[in-house]
Amino acid sequence: MGVRRLVVVALAVVLLVAPFVFSSYWVGLLTEITILAMLAMSLDILLGYTGLPSLGHASLFGVAAYAVGVFSTTYHMGFWSCVLGGIVVGVLLSAAIGLVVSHVRDVYFLMITLAIGMVLWGLSYRWIPVTGGDNGLSGIPRLEVHAGLPFAGPNTFYYIALAVFATSALAIAILVRSPFGLTLRGIRENEARMKSLGFNTWLHCYLSFIVSGFFASVAGILWAYYNGFVSPTYLDLTASSELFLMVTLGGPSTLIGPVLGAGAIVLLKNVMSAYTARWLLILGIVYIVAILAAPRGVWNLGDRGSG
Amino acid sequence: MNTIRVVVVALGLIAGIGIVRGQSATDPIKIGFMVPLSGANAQNGRDILNGFVMLLEEAGYQAGGRRIQLIVEDDEGIPAVGLTKARKLVERDQVHMMGGPLLASSAYAIAPYIDSQQIPMVYPVASGDDLTQRRRSKWIVRTGYTSSQPNHPFGEYAYQTMKMRRIATIALDYAFGWESVGGFERTFEEQGGQITKKLWVPLSVHDFGPYLAQLSRDLDGVYALFLGRTALQFMRQYQEYGLKGRVQLIGMGTTTDEHVLPAMGDEATGVVTALHYSGALDTPANRKFAAAYRARFKRVPSYYSESMYTGGKWLLAAIEALNGKVEDRGVLLDAIRKATPSDLPRGPVTIDEYGNPIENIYVRRVDRVNGELQNTVIATLPAVSQFWKYNPAEYLKQPLYAR
């Protein structure tokens, strides 16, 4: 446990002081990492704690980002309307999809979320009057300006993202340790037993999906503001599977694992591609080695049993 | 088991060292360049990069008395990755100017960032009409073309010279397809022609059968827009379905561009397409370029290869004009816009006030010459503007071409 606590404290310190130490490029990468880490944690609720492997999670994230894009560029709505709009759209969508997917488990869950993710991707690609199609929507105002903050610049955005990330992480951590979270883990381990104990497992899975969708939407809103544009690639299969990798690489049902996974993948991609054109090969080797050496994720190394 | 943890920490440290090392004195002029070098568009991206590398090699990586450092990034053809890479080039490498990307979606995504950072940039290929029309950027000069640009004159050519009256179109279902077909449809129908059917094919298409079955045999022509894998397969199936020889195939230049042409067979002969370049363009400047490119890369130059060879000339000309003093970005941007490179492989080019080239459009027919397929130029439509013969102000009031 000592090593882990040390890593967490070191990470927290690095994240807090980053803008004073690093150049704006690295602060930008850290901003990406915090947003994607939030998204990876939201998937961890499903994948790690409830045992529902979703291959369409990026679509919830992407739809919330699109909501911000449409509300802010087409309808010129204010900051809070955009944020609330993004969350409402994301949560309503999760609630609707959840009705369908909460009945199934394991590989069937994987396939149905994959299919729904593809449908939503197709929608973003083909509903051109609203989404701008392949070209996406650009011209989303900067968050600091849109919110009317007295400060502007990449550092301000970084701290906002970090604050939202920390709050979400805390909320998710409390959630998974609550009786509700324990029930989710029970469903993951043995659903039949949970049912016989009188738990409404369908409802728990459904709520887990919605909660997960909520945090994915929050991340999507930040992502839209951070990039200043939205595009169908936010919710394509590549995005969903990369997200899946972040969680499995880092360690499902640990919360900190997905954060590390997100950080490792973003850093590996961006640092290595600056030095070699063969970076994809290296990334592939890293994935394979990680899965072979740490099948339950890097953060779970050395553990036997409970997650 | 602790080793993996050590590796994670070590990776963090390596990243940290990279951060602290930071910038040294900027002696060379730094040019940032981004295209997809992995993924489905990697070969096209590689062609663009090759052309640029060849230009810089010819210049000895020097201009205006200063050394030039080229920094290449792979944008993977994903807009968000492109933005991250643009940030890296600007904020970490502190490039003076930039070139790229390939895809219009990436181009739209990075444009607001380029404007906010005030980095002069040339777009050699990305052809989304609005990049230099309704959503144009001050800091971006396009040296390529707009999707509709070759198609406006080609629509008239198809009606007047090829005497076509009824045409069906079949094109990839994304902005590049819509804008190209839109431009063609507009001028062709203004002449009096008729587009009987517009078929849209998803980028992930694996079988053209269901689409080809919808094409009537009594048309005067079929207009096709494909590239890469889809162009190869379409051409083959067009022949298999017995359409070749019955209905004249015409289309956008990418359908028979040299990036796929060497992989095609006789099914491609006789296809007529329009673009601002042909590898077989018979001018001294292009003969020289094509021979040098073949010698260097063992490939026929495609329009992608030529794009940044030519686009890079705007950057080099600006550096020369400023004697290497590129630090004032506003002055640099002016110099790029005012540059007038000559002897270009594709022929004369001038940049209009919207930042888009006015250039020749070539009507090309695929022929087999000395055993090799080539795009023989059969007509030159000189000095074509992105607005064709229309008034720019009125043109911009109309909506962008869509499905």
Image (tube, grey):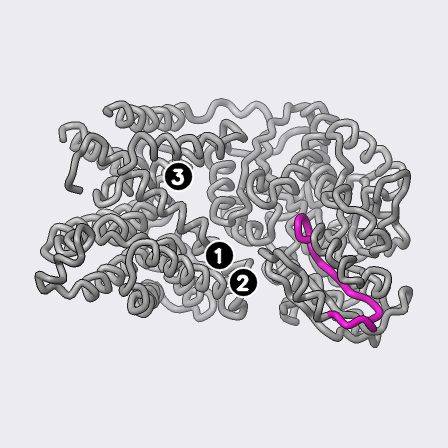
Which of the pair B234/B9 is nearer the observer? Answer: B234
- Vertical arrangement, residue A266 with respect to residue B350, above or below: above
Residue B207, given in percent of the width and then of the height, sits at: 64, 58
Instruction: Using a 10 Å C-alpha cutoff, classify the residue at mark 1 as few (fewer than 14 neighbours), some (14 to 19) or many (20 or more).
Output: many
How far apart in space, not on screen, are marks 2 and 1 (Cα)?
Answer: 8 Å
Q: Quadrant of residue A261?
A: top left
Comes first in the chain, label 1 or label 3: 1
Query: Could you say which is closer to the camera, residue A134 or residue B117?
Result: A134
Q: Chain of mark 3?
A: A
Which mark is on residue A10?
Answer: none
SS at mark 2?
helix
Residue B297, position as x, y percentages in the image: 73, 30
Residue at x 54%, y 38% (from the top left corner): B74
Q: Residue at x 12, y 53 (%)?
A: A182
Secondary structure at badge 1 equals loop
| Label 3 SS | helix
A158 drawn magenta:
no
The answer to whether residue B243 is above or below residue A13 is below
Q: Give amino acid for label 2.
A: Gly
Residue B335 vs residue B96, the one in the foreground: B96
Name the residue beneath numbered marker 2.
A133
Q: Mark 2 and mark 1, same subunit?
A: yes
User: CA gap, disc 3 to disc 2?
Assistant: 26 Å
The residue under label 1 is which amino acid type? Ser
Q: Which residue is mark 1?
A: A231
